[in-house]
Image: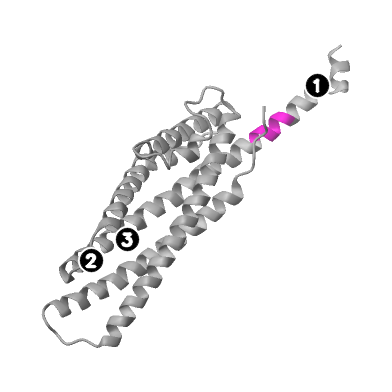
Amino acid sequence: MKKFRSNASRADWAKKISLLYIFFSVVGIIFNTYKLDFLHKVKIGEDFNQMDAELIDHIDQLLGVTLIGLYISFMILFIMWFRRAYFNLHQKFNYLQLSEGWAAGAWFVPFLNLFRPYVIMKEMVEESANYLKKVGVDVGSKAKNILSPWWTFTVISMILGRIIWKMKTDSLEELIDLTQLLIASFAIDIITYFLFWQMIKFYSEREKLMEIAEKELEIVNHTSSSPENEMLTI
């Protein structure tokens, strides 16, 4: 059986990027609220400064590129952490529902990505609690309590993202509709990525406890199988 692999660094980086995404989502709400006000003024025929319109356009593009970069970075880091966490759980149990590869692949398969990552995370939360309970550690129910809200907001965020991606902006009305939906989407993302941060934090704490338990078990096994102990047994 393979040894338990450290996952702390991946967890730390994923949490940092999730906090950055939350920060820029707040910026996105503030900026798009200002942009929406600007668009409404244009709609009713108020005069506007062309330089203001160009500045809004530049900020819009910069914010979009930043958020796309953070999203890609976070998903790469999270999936790396998620797969390693599922791999580690496989070292404790030989009856898990899926192979460790699905912890990464499930995010990229249409339809399956709406429920399979949740199934894996649920199994991780439940089985890690069972393992630690056997070694005398009570981890509480924090991770279990946020499991359903985490996935609910994740799916909502995914759906909103796809809707926004396909929206047209050929007219002022369509641009106003898009901006309003962006504000709502950023608000959902703030909750979503905070729940991601919490889920990583809570499960990482369990992984540390499992890693400690594994090392202590190795010490006990090594001690019990040493020649000195064998002589004492005889």
Tell me the amino acid under the disc marked 2. Thr
**Disc 2 marks which residue?**
169
**Disc 1 marks which residue?**
225
Which SS class for mark 2? Answer: loop
Query: Is residue 187 placed above or below 40 in the rendered structure?
Result: above
Crowd around label 1: few <14 · some 14–19 · many ≥20 (10 Å): few
Crowd around label 2: few <14 · some 14–19 · many ≥20 (10 Å): few
- Quadrant containing the C terminus is top right
Report if residue 87 lies within the magenta region: no
Asked if marks 1 and 3 touch (Cβ < 8 Å), the reply is no
Q: Nearer the viewer, mark 2 or mark 3?
A: 2
Tell me the amino acid under the disc marked 1. Ser
* Distance from the alpha carbon under mark 1 to that under mark 3: 58 Å
Report if residue 216 lies within the magenta region: yes
The percent position of residue 149, horizontal first and vertical second, equals: 34, 44
As rendered, which of 49 and 195 lies closer to the eye? Answer: 49
Q: Nearer the viewer, mark 1 or mark 3?
A: 3
Q: Is residue 132 left or right of residue 183?
A: right
Q: Earlier in the sequence, mark 1 or mark 3?
A: 3
Q: Earlier in the sequence, mark 1 or mark 2?
A: 2
Q: Which residues are magenta?
A: 213-218
As rendered, which of 158 and 30 lies closer to the eye? Answer: 158
The percent position of residue 151, horizontal first and vertical second, equals: 36, 43
Crowd around label 3: few <14 · some 14–19 · many ≥20 (10 Å): many
**Disc 3 marks which residue?**
186
